[in-house]
Image (tube, coloured by chain):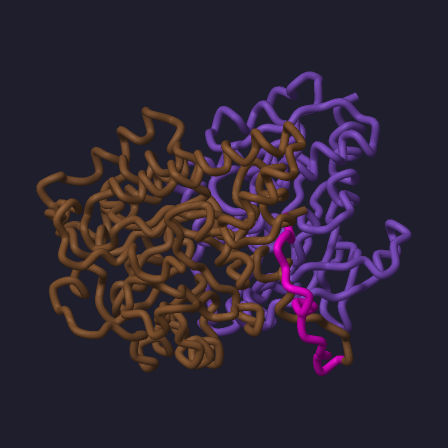
Chain colours: A purple, B brown
């Protein structure tokens, strides 16, 4: 794998979901972190070799996975992830990164997955849209208390592997983790006023790009 | 962040706590509009039974819309069209992992409550069904479940948003296999937004106020729309989309995604058609992929469709107040 050269390019997997919200959050994170860079909507295999970090947005994980499979991008993306590409998955993105996934209602799923994040994820863990909610929690690593999270038909992390750091919990449920260069959240940081997660991703990508 | 303009004062959400004692707020405008944002760039497919719902999910639908009859069959059958049977909706809720939506009649608050109660993810207050109230729509702020409503112009769209709609779709002319009316409606909304934007940029608030008054919407919501240069909620195309090229056309015109009603399950190649429409929706701006999608279907298998100029039943005229 050849490493792309500067300037920093942060990709957002651009098949389906709230792609624009992530592009905007990334733009504002560039400003806040005082780091120069661009964003790219990733839809082709060729795009994968151009980026220094990738965001997998919220949306429907079955749709995003099916498209990644249909466009023959799974192997290329897995290789880059194994290679340490800084990556963030939110909601559907978390599901897509997880090693093991089941659905609260239909049980085992045979949907395509990247299986790089050592966690067990329950899909639609809180129920349907009617049970979607906002709640406040602390993120000690970022020195934040009372972070307002938006959980939309959200998954939950039920088990974490030995090399996974828990960043945030809501009661007993794990809702944000980091494993090496991979960040994943059950909620939608791109719908919040804070771009802290995007800044963390950019900083990771920037330090690797030097 | 997403726009939260046009909220009624009462929309503060419903407070509650889970078994672990965590404080939660349900049904806020952010949660309802946020749900619609997660559907973007996707295809929502009309289905009438479990078999169709599975085909839709396998083909890459972002959600399914359950109804008793496809719009084409509603036209053929005549009579009163009501919300779908709850047994069928329940069956589909238990079997698919993607969101499940269902239609209720315009103004029929109880049909909507029933749909919310059984747990559908979004309610479509739809002109495809026979309206239950000729003068008013449902006051959607009262619900935790988000709503999508149809619109043909900016006034209709903004009035629905002020009633609490979290998503707008063009009305088009459902069940015709003819995309012309949907194209017209998206163009009208676009032109209306461009027009108010001119007055907004000139800071001509007298004219903005006059326009808001004429459309029967608040000045605040009209200004936010002008500032954004688009509707403040997610806007999908619907009505007559039949081929991958139709889907790409609607996205190229600026829609955030599409609904396909009769176009898939009234064709003779539903699975391939559904897949091809999903592909061209994602790659609408890449002609070479739209070609690939268009090659997946056989035009001989498209639904025949109807000319919209001399229809007896014009569904789009329903619920324009």
Horizontal and vertical percent position of residue A119: 65, 59
Left/right of residue B258 with respect to residue B209 in the rendered view: left
Residue A187 location, quadrant: bottom right
Q: Quadrant of residue A160?
A: bottom right
Is-magenta flag for residue B17? yes
Residue at point 48%, 44% (across, down): A16
The number of discs equals: 0
Secondary structure predominantly adopted by residues drawn in magenta: loop
Q: Is residue B36 left or right of residue B52?
A: right
Decide which of B119, B135 is in the foreground and name it.
B135
> What residue sits 23% from the left and 46% below the top?
B273
Span highlighted in magenta in the image: B3-20
> Where is residue B66 drawn, in percent x and y?
33, 67
| Residue A72, placed above or below residue A119 | above
Q: Is residue A26 above or below residue B111?
A: above
Q: Nearer the viewer, residue A102 or B141?
A: B141
Nearest the camera: A184 or B80? Answer: B80
Q: Quadrant of the N terminus of chain A?
A: top right
**Residue A193 makes an appearance in the image:** yes
């Amino acid at each position: 794998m050849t490493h792309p050269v500067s300037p920093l390019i942060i990709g957002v997997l651009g098949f389906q979901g709230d792609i624009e919200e992530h592009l905007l959050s990334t733009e504002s994170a560039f400003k806040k972190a005082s780091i120069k860079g661009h964003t790219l909507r990733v839809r082709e295999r060729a795009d994968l070799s151009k980026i220094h970090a990738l965001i997998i947005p919220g949306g429907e994980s079955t749709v995003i996975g099916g498209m990644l499979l249909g466009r023959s991008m799974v192997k290329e993306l897995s290789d880059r992830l194994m290679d340490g590409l800084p990556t963030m998955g939110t909601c559907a993105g978390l599901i897509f990164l997880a090693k093991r996934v089941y659905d609260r209602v239909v049980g085992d799923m045979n949907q395509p997955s990247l299986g790089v994040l050592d966690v067990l994820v329950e899909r639609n863990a809180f129920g349907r849209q009617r049970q979607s909610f906002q709640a406040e929690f602390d993120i000690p690593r970022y020195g934040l208390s009372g972070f307002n999270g938006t959980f939309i038909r959200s998954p939950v992390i039920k088990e974490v592997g030995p090399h996974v750091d828990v960043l945030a919990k809501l009661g007993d449920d794990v809702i944000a983790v980091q494993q090496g260069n991979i960040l994943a959240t059950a909620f939608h940081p791109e719908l919040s006023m804070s771009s802290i997660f995007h800044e963390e991703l950019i900083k990771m990508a920037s330090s690797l790009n030097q | 962040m997403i726009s939260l303009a046009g909220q009624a004062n009462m929309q503060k959400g419903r407070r509650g706590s889970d078994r672990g004692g965590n404080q939660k707020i349900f049904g806020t405008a952010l949660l309802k509009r946020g749900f619609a944002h997660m559907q973007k760039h996707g295809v929502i497919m009309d289905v009438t039974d479990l078999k169709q719902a599975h085909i839709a999910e396998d083909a890459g639908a972002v959600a399914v819309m359950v109804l008793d009859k496809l719009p084409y069959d509603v036209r053929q059958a005549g009579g009163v069209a009501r919300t779908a049977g709850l047994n069928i909706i329940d069956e589909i809720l238990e079997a698919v992992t993607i969101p499940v939506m269902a239609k209720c009649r315009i103004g029929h608050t109880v049909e909507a409550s029933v749909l919310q109660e059984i747990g559908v993810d979004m309610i479509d207050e739809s002109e495809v069904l026979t309206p239950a109230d000729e003068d008013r729509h449902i006051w959607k702020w009262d619900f935790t479940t988000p709503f999508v409503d149809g619109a043909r112009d900016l006034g209709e769209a903004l009035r629905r948003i002020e009633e609490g709609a979290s998503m707008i779709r063009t009305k088009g002319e459902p069940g015709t296999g003819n995309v012309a009316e949907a194209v017209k409606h998206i163009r009208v909304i676009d032109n209306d937004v461009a027009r108010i934007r001119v007055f907004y940029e000139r800071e001509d608030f007298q004219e903005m106020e006059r326009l808001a008054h004429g459309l029967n919407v608040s000045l605040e919501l009209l200004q936010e729309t002008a500032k954004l240069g688009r509707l403040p909620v997610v806007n999908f195309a619907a009505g007559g989309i039949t081929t991958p090229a139709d889907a790409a056309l609607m996205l190229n015109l600026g829609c955030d995604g599409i609904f396909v009603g009769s176009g898939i399950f009234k064709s003779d190649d539903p699975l391939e058609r559904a897949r091809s429409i999903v592909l061209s929706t994602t790659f609408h701006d890449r002609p070479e992929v739209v070609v690939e999608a268009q090659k997946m279907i056989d035009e001989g298998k498209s639904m025949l469709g109807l000319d919209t100029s001399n229809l007896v039943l014009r569904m789009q005229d329903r619920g324009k107040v």
